[in-house]
Structure formats: C-alpha cells, structure tokens
Amino acid sequence: MDACMATTGERFANRLLSIHRFVNRSLVGRLLRTALPVPGGATTAAVAAAAPSPLVRQLGKNALVVDADALLLKQPSPGAAFPPYFLVAVEAGGYLRGLVLLALYPVLHVLPHGARARAMAFVSFCGLRRDEAARIGRAVLPKLFSREAAPLGMGMRGVEALNALPKEVKLVAVSRTFPTVMVEAFLKEYVGFHAVAGRELKGGPRYLTGAMADELDTERLARVLKQTERAASCAYPKPVVFHDGRLAFTPTPAAALAMYIYFPFAVALAVIRIAIYVLLPWRLSSVVAGLTGVRVRVIGPTPAAAEDGSDDAKPYGGRLYACNHRTLLDPVGIACALRGPVAAVTYSLSRLSEVLSPIPLRRLTRNREEDRRRMSSMLARGDVVVCPEGTTCREPYLLRFSPLALFAELAAEVTPVAVDARTTVFYATSTSPVAKSFDSVYFLMNPRPEYSVQFLEPVNTESGKSSIEVANEVQAALASALGFEGTALTRKDKYLLLAGNEGVVKTK
C-alpha cells in the first residue's frame, strides 16, 4: 500500500513539474519576483520540490494555482495591462471614456502596480452595468488575450500535461491585475481552468462603482472549488471562433493615440466612399473607390453574362450566388467584381443600411413560404446573392448553413462565391442592434479595406441530390477555396455567446 501511494505521489509530482517547466518555458519565460500567497500549502515534500516557482503552486491536496497575470501579460512593463482595460473603456463606455483613460496614461505609468490597476479599473468600469461588463469579458476580451497573450500558443506538450492530470485535480487561475469579470470567461472557456479568482469590483446589484477590492476573495474561491466538477475531456486550448467589439488592433497607448488622431479622417473617408458607391455607375465607382484606398481583388475568372436567347440563359431569371458571410458588404464586393448590380437578401437589416446600400436589399422573415416568394421574385428580375450562414463570422471558420437550405431549391444551379474581408483598425460586424447599423460605415473607415472575391464552379441543384446535400456541397467548396474550417455552429450559437439572445430580429 505504501509503495502504491509513493508511486502515485511521484507520478503527480512529475506531472506538476512538467506543467511548471511548461509555464516557465512556453508561456512566460520568466519568474515572478514576488511570491503568490497560497492558502493551505503543499501536502508532500515531493510536490513542493516540484513547484518551487510562484507561477504554479499547490492548493490543498487536489488543486493547482497558476498566476494568471504571468500567462496573460507578455511583459511585466507598466503598460502591459493597458490594452485590456482600454478595450473595456471603449467597447462598454464609448470612445470618450477611452480617451480619458488614454489621457491619464502618463500618470498611470509612474504609479505602483497595485495603484495603477485600481485606477485603470475605476476609469474603465465606473458606472457600467454588471451585465455589460460581463458581456465585454465574454465577447470582446478573449480575442485580445488569445492574440497577444501566451495561453493559446501553448504547445501540445503543455496541453498534454494539463490533460494528463488526475481527474480529481482542479486548476485555479489567480489574477492580481485584472478583476475576475475580465479574465474568467477566457481562462475557463478557452484555456481550461476550473476556477478563476481576481480582485472583485465593488458596486450595487446592477451597476459597478469601479472600485476594486484590495485583496483576493479566497472564500469565494473555496466555494467555487467545492462546486466545480472537472469538465469532461475537452481539447484545450480552444480557438476563439466568435468575438465582438469594434477595434481590430491591439490598443497599446501608442496605437490608441494613433487611432484617435486618425478617427476624424476615417469618418470623412467613409462619407466620401459611400458617396462614390451610391452616386457613380458601377463600372466607374470601383475605379474611383480604388483611388481612396478600397481594394476589391478578384481571384480567377468571373462568370460570363448570359445573353437573352442564348443556350446559357437561365430559365429561372438571374444567377443565384451563395457566399460565405464576412460583413454586410459581401454582396457589394461581389457586385464590384462583376462590375454590375446584384440584389441581396438578409435576415437582419437596419434602416440605415438600407438607405446607404448601393444595391437592392430585401429582408427575410424566417417563414419558409414567404421567404421563398421574396427570393423567387428577386431572382426573376436579376442576379441575387444569398449568405446561407445567416450571420457573419470574423475568424477562418464556416458556420452551418441554414437547415432549410432554401437557396438550393430556387435555381437550376448555384454559384459558390468565396469572399474574405480584411481590416486593420475597425471591425465591420457587431451583435448590438444599434451598433449593427454602422457596420458598413466602420468597414469603409479603415485606411485600406480590402475584399477578395473568388467565383467557384457552379453546383447543379437538379442532379437528384436533396437541398441539404447541395448546401453541404456548396459549403465544402467554399471551405476548400478559402482554407477555412467548417463547423456545426449556427447564428443562434453566436448570439447566445456574444449577446445573450438568439439573434432573432422582429419584423413587421
């Protein structure tokens, strides 16, 4: 019995040592100078010897504590924590709040670490609703952490070390720089920690004051650990498929300052570009817009226009295009590539988007027969673009096409179109009903917005295959052309994660 217990203890110690070495080498590459206080303490001399660094410590018998700040911050510099707080300030509080935080940066830079974190938290969170703060931590910050921090770049050896731990061992992340609401979603959902403890934000039941607690809430941590069950085997780290927010860059102090200087010029540039597309003919608008920095890159040949009376003329009217959905301007990019107008159908559409659109747009109702009637009517008058995913996805993934696959029943063939959009300053998608109205404007506010358009071989819809099989064939062709990964995720999954609703827009 003693020999068996010793063997188990040695195995646990070896795995702990493996994680410790992995954190030091792959995630941080440095040791913290101040020890992380851990209640409880190690239970065996072997485990204590295996984890001499404050990065990984043992908590009781069945938990490991990891310093989350060392994982999330690349460098221990005074400005390392600025980008996440700035994102909270801008995305939840607006550009003015972000400007206040940026203006205070010279003062924040000279403050001690603890005072600097409390000051940034106060400016970023003061007066925010608790649910809005939680939404930013769930929908916006994971992309920043995955892009700039180390956890999602971990090697397979480190992931295997985490997964190889006994089932009863729980991983706890502790942060002294960020409130729990900022890091909990990322560390639990995408990295695989079972519990996260940070310095809690004070406030009432609905609103936050922005004041951050001086010490970690160890009692809350103990309660969470008791209630937490280790999740079923899951591959960590997980990729960030859905995320929200407007800023497409890492907002370091210098980059944030450049953004504010550029912002007035961006608005003027967007107004000019919108006027070009709305007022000028198609063959001329693409050329003139290119002089302002807009680029539409066509990969491969474009479909030849069918002449009336020819054998290639479509008996169903216009040509039906099915494309993946990157932004609301996907049909406009296709129209630029074709150098002619096309119509488009979409599920959610703001009045502002309808007014600014240079092409005809039509709302869908999610009623199968009514949508069939609307799409057939538009197709009889000319070319139509449909986005079967039903919502946009910023990352290189394709969402599941509509289970109704209605687009595969309206024409003798469907032409898949692989589109991709590139932006450098502002994202052109949003899940907020108000912010969504300005999606197209934000795309055109980028210095050099770019669309790539590739027309693929048409897919025959009258080959005896079901509409679902045709939809899957179109999706596979798009994924292959773009190098994207197909998923079973849907519009509902996206909106439940990012907005807390199912993304259903009421229509009259």
Image: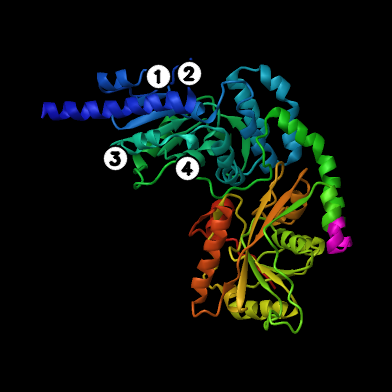
Circle number at residue 53: 1
Query: Horizontally, is 317 left or right of 57 in the view?
Result: right
Q: Nearer the viewer, residue 361 or 486?
A: 486
Q: Is residue 281 magenta?
A: yes
Circles 3, 4 touching at the beta carbon (< 8 Å) = no
Q: Nearer the viewer, residue 6 or 133?
A: 6
Residue linked to disc 2 = 32
Q: Position of residue 318 (x, y in %)?
A: 71, 76
N-terminal-most mark, 1 or 2? 2
Amino acid on which disc 3 is placed:
Lys
Residue linked to disc 3 = 167
N-terminal-most mark, 1 or 3? 1
CA–CA distance between discs 3 and 2?
29 Å
Residue linked to disc 4 = 190
CA–CA distance between discs 3 and 4?
19 Å
Circle number at residue 405: none
Q: Position of residue 245 (x, y in %)?
A: 65, 46
Identify the magenta region.
Answer: 276-285
Q: Quadrant of the N terminus?
A: top left
Circles 1, 2 touching at the beta carbon (< 8 Å) = yes
Query: Horizontally, is 462 left or right of 54 in the view?
Result: right
Query: In the structure shown, which secondary structural element does the residue marked by tag 2 occupy?
Result: loop
Q: Position of residue 198 (x, y in %)?
A: 50, 31
Residue drawn at x 72%, y 21% as measured from the top left:
106
